[in-house]
């Protein structure tokens, strides 16, 4: 039996992030929600300080946390503080919610690679935040762009991989 892992990231509106990650190799499940804020049981209308994020369940025999972060930095702009496209505010910040020292080390390594690549005009402002409770969003936000094919997203693949070889 495979031991699936979970990763937690935020990079702007959770609809677009989820839509792109759902079809990635090794991603078993996605769920959108709120993380890193001030209240318990946040909602779309009341989530002070929470980022709109996604919980990724993945098979580590098919993908790695490093590969997940590589893709993460390719589908959103990690150089804008509290903003993605037309969405502004701390809900739309770029963040990685770190569960352990290994994830922190990998995140720092990938951020350095992305910064050194020169592909983005500015430096990465993605925050590394300690893992906190992930609060699933309301059902109407889950798989939103599947249910609403004309829905808004500012996420798309901007670059090929930042990582020449995944180790």
Image (cartoon, grey):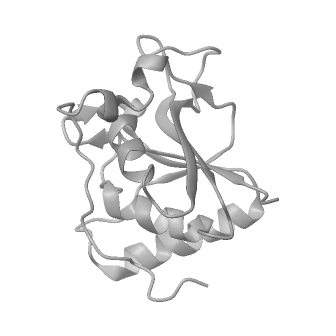
Q: Please state, as top left, top right, bottom left or bottom right, where the C terminus lies in the image.
A: bottom right
Q: Where is residue 107 in the image (x, y as percent from the top left)?
A: 58, 65
Q: Nearer the viewer, residue 144 or 106?
A: 144
Q: Which of 84 and 146 is in front in this view?
A: 146
User: Based on the displayed image, in which of its 4 quarters is residue 153 positioned?
Assistant: top left
Instruction: Point out the residue furthest to the right here.
Output: 1
Q: Which of 50 and 163 is in front in this view?
A: 163
Who's the residue at 44% across and 88% down the image? 164
Compared across the picture, whether 143 is left or right of 28 comes to: left
- The answer to whether 34 is drawn above or below residue 81 in the figure is above
- The answer to whether 9 is drawn above or below residue 37 in the figure is below
Q: Position of residue 91 (x, y in %)?
A: 41, 31
Instruction: Point out the residue furthest to the top here.
Output: 45
Q: Is residue 25 visible?
A: yes
Who's the residue at 52% across and 70% down the image? 67
Who's the residue at 27% across and 71% down the image? 159
Q: Please state, as top left, top right, bottom left or bottom right, where the N terminus lies in the image.
A: bottom right
Q: Position of residue 123 (x, y in %)?
A: 35, 65
Who's the residue at 39% across and 74% down the image? 115
Number of numbered discs overlaid on the protein picture: 0
Instruction: Point out the residue furthest to the bottom here.
Output: 165
Q: Is residue 124 visible?
A: no
Instruction: Point out the residue furthest to the front here.
Output: 1
Compared across the picture, whether 93 is left or right of 96 comes to: left
């Amino acid at each position: 039996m495979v031991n699936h892992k979970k990763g937690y990231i935020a990079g702007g509106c959770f609809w677009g992030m989820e839509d792109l990650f759902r079809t990635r190799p090794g991603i078993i499940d996605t769920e959108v929600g709120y993380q890193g804020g001030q209240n318990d049981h946040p909602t779309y209308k009341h989530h002070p300080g929470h980022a709109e994020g996604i919980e990724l369940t993945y098979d580590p025999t098919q993908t790695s946390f490093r590969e997940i972060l590589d893709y993460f930095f390719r589908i959103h702009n990690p150089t804008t503080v509290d903003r993605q496209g037309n969405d502004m505010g701390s809900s739309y910040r770029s963040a990685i919610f770190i569960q352990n020292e290994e994830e922190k080390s990998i995140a720092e390594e990938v951020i350095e690679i992305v910064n050194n690549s020169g592909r983005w005009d500015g430096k990465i402002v993605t925050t590394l935040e300690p893992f906190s409770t992930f609060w699933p969003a309301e059902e109407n936000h889950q798989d939103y762009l599947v249910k609403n094919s004309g829905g808004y997203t500012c996420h798309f693949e901007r670059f090929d991989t930042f990582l020449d070889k995944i180790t």
